[in-house]
């Protein structure tokens, strides 16, 4: 009953946030040009590593084919609004947040690498297409992979929240291919998985693949192979129901086409050396892109594809909780909502959600076990050792692991350590994250254990010594049992924190709850339902841990040692 109540409250909370965000809209909701004129600033959404389309050159500077087109549009906006000056503000966006940031007015134009699709047109508008992308496969030279069929039994990476994930899934269904799919949190991380050998192939837009290869330490170690898996119209994204902005942007693009600027920009960004390394992308102009310039339009990807991309998107107004019973491959409603059924091997989003929950719990459980085994003895040892090299080592260990951000530690263990210890590369990603999260939490528990021991009245230790117990025996039979009971509340907090911190596992392709939420939201276009479900599971998981450890605390509480007892001075063994 309690869990049911928590679930309902969690869903209601998420829904209320969404409603509130829609209720308190900007006064310039449908007048972006009015906002730009009032503020004297146009905000462009850009990407850090979208090949030559949009990339960072460092220190907050961004450039690329799409970015320069947007700067030309900004110049036309300045002239149209008769502004003396117009500031350009750049905000880096990701596959997961780009659409919401356009919707809520945070960015005025999204100048990254976004595919124009029918589903996205329900939320945002697209300008005339200026680039037709080809979805291709990047591999290491000599890999033996030359086509989609060669991916059998391989590990394939793509970027979370992007169209190629769905395209790959749809194309291989009829080929009866079996391979492992992992996801990078952005394009740079996806390529790093290929570069480090943790993935055999990277499926993504050809321009993004070419851009990452060009900026690699050894570009000649990689190649793009196979026929295009799909053609995707890439376009500048802007807010819906803002006809004045849409007309101006489209007119600006047509002007660039008429003036012959787009071929010049293509040569500049794809066929000549570009910053920051002066390398050449080497992507020739395709016939499809040239045709799009000759006939300016904002047609969605569905009109370019030679195959049907099955999705679980629905047009139902309001909330649609039935989305969890749709198949992740076919998009059809499945009778057996918890798993496979009459549609073959297709499984539902509910099954995917439950499986993601298992990964979250697995990572959290292993991490907490490591934290207990390492952190508690470490904290006790720090109250025993004198001012020696060992004491300094223990202090340095604790400070390093508890002060470096957990995401940085995960990357260090996943990408750096294998270069020093090669066999570490064979370790599963979930175990790498568990080690990083476990040591991070162990350092915190070390301090809490030390504080718990120092909170025990000094007379306890003196009495143990009077009975003839050695220091180690005193700790084993007297000090540690009491200290463990004292720190149970802090153990409860750390256990709950581990469940939340396990979300960093998505950064190295562990298919846990956060990764599920990002990919499922992109595929279903049902953000409220997906994120509400994930939020409810996080809350339920934390609540269960809280209740279990509170029960343990109640049963093991030391009589006379409450929150108001006098804290003694440090024990001196």
Image (spheres, rainbow, N blue to C red):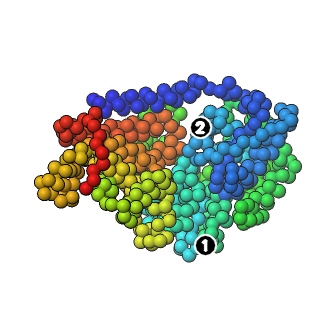
Q: Residue at coordinates 87% horizontally, 49% vertically from top-left?
A: 259
Residue 151 location, x and y as percent? 50, 65
Lower position in the chain sequence, tag 1 or tag 2:
2
**Drawn side of residue 306 relative to residue 32, left or right:** left
Label 2, residues with CA under 10 Å away: few <14, some 14-19, many ≥20: some
Please count the marks in the image: 2
Residue 170 visible in the picture: no
**Drawn side of residue 152 relative to residue 307, left or right:** left
Q: Are marks 1 and 2 in contact (CB under 8 Å)?
A: no
Q: Secondary structure at mark 1?
A: helix
Q: Residue at coordinates 50% horizontally, 68% vertically from top-left?
A: 197
Q: Residue at coordinates 62% horizontally, 69% vertically from top-left?
A: 217
Circle 2 sits on which residue? Answer: 100
Q: Tell me the quarter of the image containing the N terminus.
A: top left
Residue 218 location, x and y as percent? 63, 71
Observer-nearest of 24 and 227: 24
Circle 1 sits on which residue? Answer: 221
Q: Residue at coordinates 46% horizontally, 38% vertically from top-left?
A: 531
Observer-nearest of 244 and 14: 14
Relative height, residue 203 to residue 101 (above, below): below
Label 1, residues with CA under 10 Å away: few <14, some 14-19, many ≥20: few
């Amino acid at each position: 009953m309690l869990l049911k109540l928590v679930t309902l409250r969690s869903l209601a909370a998420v829904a209320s946030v969404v409603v509130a965000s829609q209720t308190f809209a900007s006064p310039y909701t449908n007048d972006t040009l009015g906002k730009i004129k009032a503020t004297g600033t146009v905000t462009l959404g850009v990407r850090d590593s979208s090949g030559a389309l949009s990339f960072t050159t460092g220190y907050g500077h961004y450039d690329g084919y799409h970015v320069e087109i947007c700067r030309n549009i900004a110049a036309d906006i300045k002239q149209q609004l008769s502004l003396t000056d117009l500031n350009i503000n750049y905000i880096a966006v990701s596959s997961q947040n780009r659409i919401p940031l356009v919707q809520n007015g945070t960015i005025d134009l999204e100048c990254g690498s976004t595919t124009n699709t029918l589903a996205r047109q329900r939320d945002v508008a697209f300008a005339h297409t200026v680039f037709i992308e080809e979805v291709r496969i990047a591999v290491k030279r000599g890999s033996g992979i030359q086509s989609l069929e060669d991916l059998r039994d391989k590990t394939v990476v793509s970027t979370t929240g992007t169209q190629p994930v769905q395209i790959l899934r749809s194309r291989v269904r009829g080929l009866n291919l079996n391979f492992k799919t992992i996801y990078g949190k952005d394009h740079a991380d996806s390529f790093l998985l290929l570069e480090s050998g943790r993935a055999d192939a990277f499926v993504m837009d050809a321009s993004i693949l070419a851009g990452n290869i060009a900026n690699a330490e050894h570009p000649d170690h990689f190649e793009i192979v196979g026929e295009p898996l799909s053609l995707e119209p890439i376009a500048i994204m802007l807010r819906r129901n803002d006809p004045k902005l849409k007309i101006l942007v489209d007119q600006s693009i047509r002007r660039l086409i008429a003036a012959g600027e787009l071929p010049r920009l293509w040569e500049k960004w794809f066929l000549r050396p570009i910053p920051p390394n002066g390398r050449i992308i080497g992507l020739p102009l395709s016939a499809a892109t040239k045709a799009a310039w000759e006939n300016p339009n904002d047609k969605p990807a569905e009109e370019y594809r030679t195959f049907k991309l099955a999705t679980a998107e629905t047009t139902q107004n309001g909330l649609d909780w039935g989305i969890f019973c749709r198949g992740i491959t076919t998009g059809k409603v499945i009778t057996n909502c918890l798993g496979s059924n009459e549609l073959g091997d297709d499984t539902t989003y509910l099954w995917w959600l439950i499986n993601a929950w298992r990964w979250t719990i697995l990572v959290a459980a292993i991490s907490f076990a490591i934290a207990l085994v390492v952190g508690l003895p470490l904290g006790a040892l720090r109250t025993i050792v004198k001012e020696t090299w060992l004491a300094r080592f223990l202090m340095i260990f604790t400070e390093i692991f508890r002060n470096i951000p957990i995401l940085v530690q995960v990357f260090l263990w996943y990408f750096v350590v294998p270069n020093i210890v090669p066999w570490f590369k064979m370790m599963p990603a979930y175990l790498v994250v568990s080690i990083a999260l476990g040591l991070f939490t162990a350092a915190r528990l070390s301090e809490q254990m030390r504080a718990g021991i120092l909170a025990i009245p000094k007379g306890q230790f003196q009495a143990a010594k009077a009975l003839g117990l050695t220091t180690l025996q005193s700790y084993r039979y007297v000090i540690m049992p009491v200290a463990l009971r004292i720190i149970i509340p802090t153990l409860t907090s750390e256990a709950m924190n581990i469940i939340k911190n396990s979300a960093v596992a998505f950064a190295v392709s562990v298919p846990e709850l956060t990764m599920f939420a990002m990919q499922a939201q992109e595929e279903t276009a049902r953000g409220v339902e997906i994120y509400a479900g994930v939020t409810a599971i996080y809350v339920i998981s934390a609540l269960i841990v809280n209740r279990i450890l509170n029960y343990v605390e109640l049963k093991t509480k030391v009589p006379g040692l409450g929150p108001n007892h006098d804290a003694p001075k440090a024990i001196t063994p």
